[in-house]
Every structure is written in structure tokens, then in C-alpha cells.
Image: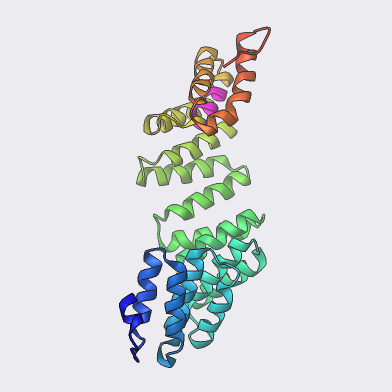
């Protein structure tokens, strides 16, 4: 494609494929150059605008992507274009415009699961729990095994302090993804917040079987061990955090709190030095 660019080739349609290849190779600026050449071809203008917006999004140029997408929408009003526009606004922190565009995407294609899921996540972040729940349910009605919909719905339920439902939704996803440590971590936290500490410990055990350097799991498990009065195991987990802190940034962040808990549990006169 670069060689073709050195010749005076009248047909610039090859630039569309070149722009797409550049996007895949993360050569965004070069790709944008090819995209601009595509825009000069009247019959390819829409395709040129789409690939230009894709390059802008991939580059992180969320401020300019909506303008490009608006031009494409003026030619073909498609659901996916409104979705990408919503994502661009979301990345800029413009919740109102983002929500508006997700809704527009769904209006054009009511089974746009990406738009429904992202809208639900946005609504949850903006304290619109009921609306988020409605959109999660719409996704699940279309795709009964949709991981993201259950994750968001469980978060909504936990926010409403309906922990049995939140735990039940996490259990459904875990059945589909039994080796995903993140899912056990989330369910463990829900059990912990629901004061079912032995169940929480069981889930944190599973997290650590799958990822034995997960510092958050050690810290959370130690807390639950304390709540069931298993102080030796709590001390062991706090000590593990101290051990991991030598080469793990997250462990270093938790080290101070772990040391304070060790001080209390060991009834020492001075905090332990690690």
C-alpha cells in the first residue's frame, strides 16, 4: 500500500483497505492519512468516514470521533454508529450524551446487546439502578447466558442490598465460566457484605487456587477469617500480603492496613516491621 502511494494511481480505492490494515497494526496516524484519501472518492465516502472514526476511536481521539460519526450517520443512520458515538462520549465522561446515543442505537436495533449492556453499566454508575435493571433483563431475555448482563444485574442487586439475588446471578455466571477467578472474587465480596463469611472464605479459596498471587483475595479472606474467629488463618493471610509486598504494587498498597490488623491480632506493643 505504501508503494502504491508513491505512484500516481488514479483509483484510490486501495486506500480503504490500507486504512483498515493500519488500524489492525495500530498505525493510526498513517491510517488516518489513507482514510482522508478515501473521503475524496464520492462512492466511498461513507466507508471512509467509518474507517476514519474507527481509527480515531482506536487512537483514543474520543473528542473528534463523534463529528466523524455524525457525518457517517447523515449518509446511513445505523445502530452501530450511534453505539460508537455513545462510547466516545462515555470515554469523555459525558454521561448525558452517551446515554442519549445508546438509546438511539437501541431504537434502531432493539437487539443491540452491546448497546444495552453498556447503557445498563452507565445507568448503574449514574445511580439509575431501576433503568439499569430493566436493560439487563432485556439482554437476558435475548441471550440467557450473557455474562455482562448478569454481572451488571448482580451489581444492581447488590447496590439495592438484595444479596441473595446478586449471589444467585453470580452463581449462574460461574456455572458458565467455572475457571474465572474474577467471578468468585465478586461473589465472595457479596457473601462478605451479606455477612456469610464462611461462604466468602470458600470463594476466596477458589480465587487463590486459580490465582495464588491475588492480593485482594488474601486481604478479603483474612477479614472473613477474623469474623469467624479463625485468627491464626487471618494472621497467615496478612503475613502473605507482607511477603508479596516486596514485588507486588497492589500488596504494597494494602501492607499498611495488613500490618495494623497484624498488630491487633498479635497484641504486639509495636507494629511489626516488614
* Left or right position of 262 against 188: right
Instruction: Check if residue 131 falls in the magenta segment.
Output: no
* Left or right position of 109 against 86: left
Foreground of the two, 107 or 10? 10
Give percent across and percent down for residue 32. 46, 74
- Residue placed at 58% from the left, 47% from the top? 157
> Hey, which quadrant is residue 51 in on the image?
bottom left
Give percent across and percent down for residue 55. 46, 70
User: Eyeballing the image, is 213 above or below 114?
Assistant: above
Foreground of the two, 40 or 257? 40
- Residue placed at 35% from the left, 81% from the top? 6
Instruction: Check if residue 217 falls in the magenta segment.
Output: yes
Looking at the image, the residue that sits furthest to the front is 6
Give percent across and percent down for residue 252. 56, 29
User: Eyeballing the image, is 217 above or below 18?
Assistant: above
**Position of the C terminus by quadrant:** top right
Q: Disc count in the image?
A: 0
Give percent across and percent down for residue 167. 50, 41
The residue range painted magenta reads: 216-224
Q: Is residue 196 visible?
A: no
User: Eyeballing the image, is 247 above or below 127?
Assistant: above
Q: Is residue 203 visible?
A: yes
**Position of the N terminus by quadrant:** bottom left
- Residue placed at 54% from the left, 33% from the top? 250
Secondary structure predominantly adopted by residues drawn in magenta = helix
Color style of the picture: rainbow
Amino acid at each position: 500500500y505504501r508503494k502504491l502511494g508513491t505512484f500516481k494511481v488514479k483509483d484510490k480505492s486501495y486506500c480503504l483497505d490500507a486504512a483498515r490494515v493500519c488500524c489492525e497494526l495500530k498505525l493510526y496516524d498513517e491510517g488516518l492519512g489513507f482514510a482522508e484519501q478515501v473521503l475524496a472518492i464520492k462512492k466511498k465516502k461513507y466507508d471512509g468516514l467509518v474507517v476514519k472514526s474507527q481509527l480515531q476511536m482506536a487512537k483514543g481521539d474520543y473528542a473528534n470521533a463523534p463529528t466523524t460519526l455524525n457525518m457517517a450517520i447523515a449518509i446511513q443512520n445505523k445502530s452501530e454508529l450511534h453505539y460508537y458515538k455513545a462510547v466516545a462520549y462515555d470515554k469523555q465522561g459525558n454521561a448525558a450524551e452517551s446515554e442519549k446515543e445508546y438509546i438511539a442505537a437501541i431504537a434502531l436495533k432493539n437487539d443491540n446487546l452491546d448497546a444495552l449492556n453498556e447503557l445498563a453499566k452507565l445507568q448503574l454508575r449514574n445511580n439509575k439502578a431501576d433503568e439499569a435493571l430493566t436493560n439487563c433483563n432485556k439482554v437476558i431475555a435475548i441471550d440467557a447466558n450473557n455474562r455482562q448482563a448478569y454481572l451488571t444485574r448482580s451489581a444492581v442487586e447488590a447496590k439495592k442490598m438484595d444479596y441473595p439475588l446478586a449471589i444467585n446471578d453470580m452463581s449462574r455466571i460461574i456455572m458458565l465460566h467455572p475457571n474465572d477467578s474474577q467471578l468468585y472474587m465478586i461473589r465472595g465480596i457479596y457473601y462478605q457484605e451479606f455477612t456469610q463469611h464462611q461462604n466468602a472464605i470458600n470463594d476466596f479459596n477458589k480465587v487463590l487456587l486459580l490465582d495464588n498471587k491475588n492480593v485482594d483475595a488474601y486481604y478479603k479472606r483474612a477479614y472473613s477469617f477474623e469474623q469467624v474467629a479463625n485468627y491464626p488463618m487471618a494472621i497467615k493471610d496478612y503475613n502473605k500480603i507482607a511477603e508479596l509486598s516486596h514485588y507486588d504494587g497492589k500488596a504494597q498498597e494494602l501492607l499498611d492496613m495488613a500490618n495494623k490488623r497484624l498488630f491487633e491480632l498479635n497484641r504486639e506493643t509495636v507494629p511489626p516491621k516488614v
